[in-house]
Image (cartoon, rainbow, N blue to C red):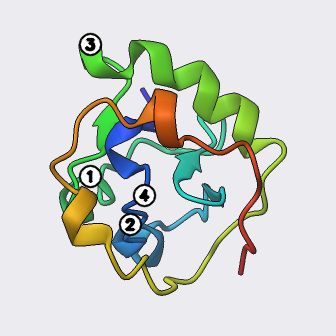
Amino acid sequence: MPYTVTEACIRCKYMDCVEVCPVDCFYEGENMLVIHPDECIDCGVCEPECPAEAIVPDTDKRAEKWLEMNRTYATTWPNITHKGEPPADADAWKETQGKFAQFFSKKPGTGS
């Protein structure tokens, strides 16, 4: 049962989750993170660290459409192992719904 990053991460990308992950299974896109489901050990330490509440277990109904997307982008985006600076306007986007269609970017992040 891996954890999955959902749409709530888009334009927030706080990265608090990266600091606590014992297996470095986070990958960085231009404006969100994803978890590689085959690397996640289901420890759950990342979930409570996310200020945007964007991380859910794959058994959560909200994870259904995001699990394969996490898998896909985790194979093309760079691995991230250290917390970086979130976008300056992250707090303004934290509660916004429906961000995927307008703001999702397939571009990779810088990784670290």
- Give the label, 2 or 4, closer to the camera: 4
Instruction: Tell me the amino acid under the disc marked 1.
Output: Glu
Q: Is residue 61 left or right of residue 69?
A: left
Disc 1 designates what residue?
47
Q: Residues within 10 Å of mark 3 (few under 14, many from 20)?
A: few
Instruction: Tell me the amino acid under the disc marked 2.
Output: Cys
Q: Earlier in the sequence, mark 4 or mark 3?
A: 4
Q: Residues within 10 Å of mark 2 (few under 14, many from 20)?
A: many
Q: Nearer the viewer, residue 39 or 62?
A: 62
Q: Residues within 10 Å of mark 4 (few under 14, many from 20)?
A: many
Q: Earlier in the sequence, mark 2 or mark 3?
A: 2
Above or below, 46 against 112 in this view is above
Disc number placed over residue 17 in the picture, else none: 2
Q: CA distance from mark 1 to mark 2?
A: 7 Å
Disc number placed over residue 61 in the picture, else none: 3
- Give the label, 1 or 4, closer to the camera: 4
Circles 4, 3 touching at the beta carbon (< 8 Å): no
Q: Earlier in the sequence, mark 3 or mark 1?
A: 1
Q: Position of residue 39 (x, y in %)?
A: 64, 44
Q: Earlier in the sequence, mark 1 or mark 2?
A: 2
Q: Position of residue 87 (x, y in %)?
A: 43, 76
Q: Earlier in the sequence, mark 1 or mark 4?
A: 4
Q: CA distance from mark 4 to mark 3?
A: 22 Å
Circles 1, 2 touching at the beta carbon (< 8 Å): yes
The answer to which quarter of the image holds residue 70 is top right
Quadrant in the picture for the N terminus: top left
Q: Earlier in the sequence, mark 2 or mark 4?
A: 4
Q: CA distance from mark 2 to mark 4?
A: 15 Å
